[in-house]
Amino acid sequence: MALDALSKLMEQFSRQPNFEELIDVMLWTISGQFSVASAFAILQRPGKSRVRSTYFATGVFKVNKELAGLRLSHDQCFYFTESRRVQRADNLGFPVGGTDLESTLADAGVKILCPVVHNDNFMGLIGLGDRVSRKGFDDDDMDLLSTLVSAITPFIVNSHLFWQIANLNKWYLDILNSVQHGVFVFDENLKLRKANNAGSDMLRGLNPYLHLVKSLEKAPIELVFPDMVFENWIDRIRNAILIGSDSVLDNMLVKTDESESIFNVRIGWSSADPDNGKDLIVTIDDVTRIKENEQRMFELQGFADKGIMASSIAHELNNFLALLMAGVQMTQLSIKRGDSGKTAVTLDKLMENVRKMKRFTMGLTDFGMLGSSMQNANLNDIITDVLSFVKVQKRFTRIKLTANLDFNLPVMLMDTDQMSQLLLNFLNNAADAIAGLGRTDGAIGLTTSQTDNLIILTVADNGSGIDPEIKDKLFKEQLTTKEDGHGFGLMTCARILESHGGKISFKSAVGEGTTFRFEFPKEYDPE
Amino acid sequence: MDAVRIVNEEMAVISTEKTLDNNNAHEMAALVAKAQREGYKFIVIDMGDLEFLASAGVGSILGSVEVARGMGGDIVLCSASEKILHVLEVLDLVEYLTIKNDVAEAETCCVH
């Protein structure tokens, strides 16, 4: 029966990784084999005395605090390692310092102690209470226990190692699950190995079809981030993978029926594992609220009531009103004279002036902000901010925006709001020119550079280009080529350039695109 | 392992499967411990279906006996086959354990 018990125990240790359950079964097996109601095991890392050990017990030993709190001295561990034999608990034969241990064991009812030693490393003790028959343990019993424990010790060592690894893995997993970013780990075949809790929650919140999928474990990345929800994510992630180094993908959009969310996605790599190779680590951070706040701030700044030229607005309105008044009077005269033809012509002109007035009032939102709030700032920062704002707008989603910036660009004196407005106007116009051509490969590129005296900004697009007939009139009057345009955008830009001592030039080819070049003096005194 | 059958406020009956060994000793121990935590002083283990009893199975029961007796109750084995009784005899447990012929007798002996 003992051999059968031993073989079952060894088979279970080799098969089952749950260390705590294995030790329980070992203690029950020994209890059953020796007919004891209570047994315990104190196990610690091989070769480490005075470190936290783990206590297992059955019967009344389960609730014995003295046994559970037992700590062996270095000398006691050494003694058990050297002797290795099963001993009676009331006669341990310690050369010194054993009386406390003996009394603790006696008080608890421990009768037999068996050291657990592996490769000259002390691993712990197994202790048995009295036999239920009270018959005591003879030498054969002691030998049998010694044989059982010796045979099972290597399995205990291996299981203990697996248990420590499992606990360590659990520790790392606990840390991963406490992170608020979504973290996804993909193997070298881009199949999902692990997602943390935040990541799983994000997927559940964004993907309405996720409930149809039983499990995402080992799912390909295309299933984790399906294109119908995470539009273009896979393309951008694969491009980042080709680059090979860590990178951040800004402003990744997710559109659902109810909302639109913006994420920053970080692409990283784990260290190479001999068994598994390098893992791809995708970390996603929901920045929707941050972007909304940025946009709100930008709009507020954009519409701040500073430097709006009230007198010129009033002047323009008065002009329109005067035209309207004259038109009404002429209409009245024509009606009095019964001249219906002239009446119709006059009414048409009236309507045209009303439309002009409407375009003017619509353009007021772009015409404003020509106050003065000059400060030293870097044009590259303005470009970066405006680009991050426009990237998420529908107008720009199918346009490739690139920025080739001179990182040694010095600061210059500028009104940052006006400069942002200038850049935004040109970007909007570029986007409209691209849309006007119906291009799907639209591109807008921005560059900064410098000479000894100048800071240079270029904005180039591959849109419809500027008709040669209107080139000369640009910036000089209320010019617009857009059906619903009002013409104040470019005039505003001209005023902004003037207030910064800047100049503008451009090259354009119809059907091919336009490049605007802005030159700002490095040293400029607005006074 | 069948769920615990409550007989009265002090007694519960657990029926074993065909084997009680390394694979299901934990289940037995957990059921007994749960019943004891819930205040059932007498746990009757019906061994009517039991064909194989391993050392681990014996140990999982033995550990609960002292706890039960400390509560003023007991672990009562019943309906054990000759083969199972022989195992208990070899392990010198027949005198120590409370063993009855069947469930009815076991339930009766636990009545105060």
Image (spheres, rainbow, N blue to C red):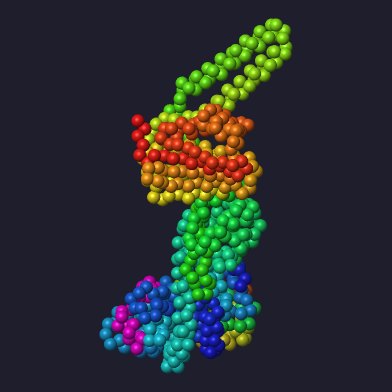
Query: Residue A342 sits in which quadrant?
Result: top right
Residue A216 is situated, as x and y percent measured from the top left of the image, at: 60, 62
**Residue under the point 58% across and 65% down:** A190
Toward the viewer: A527 or A312? A527
Magenta residues, start to end: A64-82
Toward the viewer: A439 or A476? A476
Residue A382 is situated, as x and y percent measured from the top left of the image, at: 44, 43
Q: Is residue A237 above or below residue A425?
A: below
Toward the viewer: A370 or A118? A370
Which quarter of the rendering shows the C terminus of chain A? top left
Toward the viewer: A448 or A127? A448
Q: Is residue A408 above or below residue A17?
A: above
Reply yes or no: does residue A516 show up in magenta.
Answer: no
Q: Is residue A187 visible?
A: yes
**Residue under the point 61% across and 63% down:** A220
Which quarter of the rendering shows the N terminus of chain A? bottom right
